[in-house]
Image: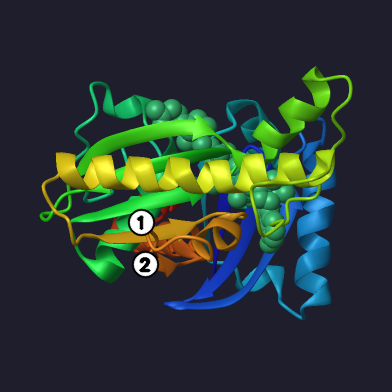
Amino acid sequence: MIVVFDVGNTNIVLGVYRGKELIDYWRIATDKEKTSDEYSMVIHQFFQYNGLDINDVEDIIISSVVPNIMYSLEHASRKLFNKEPLIVGPGIKTGMNIKYDNPKQVGADRIVNAIAAYEKYGGPLIIVDFGTATTFCAISETGEYLGGTISPGIKISSDALFEKAAKLPRVELVKPGKVICKNTVNSMQAGIIYGYVGLVEYIVNKMKKEIRCSSCRVIATGGLSTLIASETESIDIVDKFLSLEGLNIIYERNKEDRIALNNKSRV
Ligand SMILES: Nc1ncnc2c1ncn2[C@@H]1O[C@H](COP(=O)(O)OP(=O)(O)O)[C@@H](O)[C@H]1O
Ligand SMILES: CC(C)(COP(=O)(O)O)[C@@H](O)C(=O)NCCC(=O)O
Ligand SMILES: [K+]
């Protein structure tokens, strides 16, 4: 069994793989205040609750865009599984050529998504991740990571309206069905959701022109992907498990090195 962790700014998604099969997954709030003991306890509970044995875990891989949570999480993982986790970052084999000015700057989550999407759907393609931020990434026909865009996420945009405008409430992210709205809540919902649909369509079209591929596939992922995908033809596929699959693929690509390293340290 392999345990994969996708650490985002809002949630940590934790998956358990046996070979290529995702056996179980859980979502925990990303909490910088949590100690390694608290993380250990939560993870241990998930295992117990689902009848999984901690001792069956062969290895752990983590991708994170939240550096200051890593101390607690790595420590938790060492204590719980008695193993040093593999961290997605410089020095590990991803098999993807990163065409960013500074490849180390790209969020690990974007690379992990790109690897899974390219493996599953082939290139060229565009990935839209509706997380805390919304990222768009373009992948070439030969599987190069070409770059993309970062926009404020849907939830944080909506929260900013509530926090910065005295008369605006916090609203639930549901579609009001029209844009000529007769009350504050619906007006905000329409502005956020339909405004966001416009953002997605514009960036997808512009990206397709830049990669000169009008028919390339657009894959959406992340917590809020279905909300937008159901409202636009710019998104072809919603794939919720892209990041977990990407982590499992990266693990496979580094497995032999890991086993060799572990054997060496045992001698
Ligand atoms: N299963 C879900 N259903 C609806 N909303 C979700 C779900 N999971 C996450 N969200 C919401 O989507 C947003 C982004 O979450 P997520 O994709 O987990 O972000 P990140 O990867 O940045 O941690 C958050 O506002 C979260 O509350
Ligand atoms: C853009 C992000 C904040 C998205 O994170 P998320 O919404 O998944 O929490 C993350 O990928 C990140 O911190 N990236 C580093 C900058 C870059 O990708 O260029
Ligand atoms: K993410």
Instruction: State which quadrant residue 14 falls in.
Output: bottom right
Quadrant that contains the N terminus:
bottom right
Point out residue 208 in the picture as x, y percentages from the top left corner. Answer: 21, 48
Point out residue 131 in the picture as x, y percentages from the top left corner. Answer: 57, 45
* Callout in the foreground (2, 1): 2
Q: Which residue is drawn at 63% across and 37% down?
A: 9
Q: In this view, does 27 lie to the left or right of 56?
A: right
Q: Which of 70 and 31 is in front in this view?
A: 31
Neighbor class of circle 2 (other Cα within 10 Å; few <14, some 14-19, many 20+) is few
Provide the secondary structure element on which disc 2 rests.
Answer: loop
Residue 236, label in figure: 2
Q: Could you tell which of marks 2 and 1 lies nearer the N-terminus?
A: 2
Q: Which residue is drawn at 39% across and 63% down?
A: 233
Point out residue 225 in the picture as x, y percentages from the top left corner. Answer: 55, 57
Q: Mark 1 points at which residue?
A: 250
Real-space Cα separation, disc 2 to disc 1, in angstroms: 25 Å
Q: In this view, does 258 lie to the left or right of 124?
A: right
